[in-house]
Image (spheres, grey):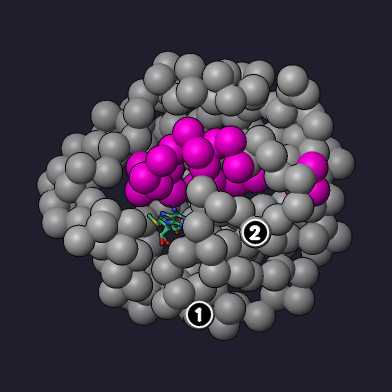
Amino acid sequence: MKKNIQTRRYFNGLAEEWEAKKIADDEKIENLLIKIDWDNCKIILDIGCGTGVLFPYLEQITHGQAKILAMDFAESMVQEAAQKKYSSIKILCGCARYLPFLDNSVDLIIAFHVFPHIKGKKLAMKECWRVLKPNGELAILHIHSSQEINAIHREIGGAVKNHKLPSAKQMCQMLDSVGFKIKQAVDRGGEYFLNGRKIMK
Ligand SMILES: C[S@@+](CC[C@H](N)C(=O)[O-])C[C@H]1O[C@@H](n2cnc3c(N)ncnc32)[C@H](O)[C@@H]1O
């Protein structure tokens, strides 16, 4: 079976119980989000949004004043997210490798706990670069280091067994080759935070 279909099926199957798992607590999420420069972020895109775990934080940080777009390729995740009913958040079903957004249209893209699962990471990065406005930022966040995540996925097994998060160094090389200027790169126990700014070629 194609890997993407397997991954979608896997997350569709988890949608109803996803939030009960409480993978990340408030403190861990806030410690990551605080590193983002929110100034002038009027249009924000949450890729691989799942059930919308980040929505309340995004609403709070932006005081409901930003337009928030969210997308995920697992339709059951999207359905759960849609039930949250935030008027400032528009949720779409789609793949991170083919973002259904215009060029130069978004100020900030957040990828929280999603990159290990994306097959074709560089293609997704190129898409992020395309839809970001000049100087817009992509932030890749995890509450674990790459080594920790990869061990967790090996232990879970099944569809995510080989879903790897490259080290910050490897991800930075990819981001750089796509045209991002790296601002911060942290990959240590309990934290993975990368952000890059779109530089025009
Ligand atoms: C580990 S979950 C994280 C969900 C959410 N960001 C959170 O932290 O609760 C990964 C999510 O990424 C989505 N995903 C994986 N690959 C994707 C892709 N290529 N395009 C869009 N979404 C994808 C999955 O469907 C799943 O909802």
Q: Quadrant of the C terminus?
A: top right
Q: Which residue is mark 1?
A: 79
Q: Does the numbered disc 1 mark a residue whose Cβ is under 8 Å from ligand 1? A: no
Is residue 67 one of those drawn in magenta?
no
User: Left or right of 24: which side holds 40?
Assistant: right
Query: Label 2, on which residue?
Result: 100
Amino acid bearing label 2: Pro
Is 167 located above or below residue 90 in the figure?
above
Q: Nearer the viewer, residue 173 or 46?
A: 173
Residue at the image position 17 percent from the left and 47 percent from the top: 161
- Name the quarter showing ligand 1: bottom left
Side of 151 relative to 50 (left or right) = left
Residue 20 sits in quarter: bottom left
**Mark 2 or mark 1, which is nearer the start of the sequence?**
1
Magenta-drawn segment? 104-127
Which quadrant of the figure has residue 60?
A: bottom right
**Residue 125 lies in the magenta stretch:** yes
Give how far across and how far down residue 146 sits, in percent. Answer: 33, 31
Going 35% across and 28% down the picture, which residue do you hit? 166
Foreground tag (1 vs 2): 2
Image coords of residue 85 (percent x, y): 66, 80
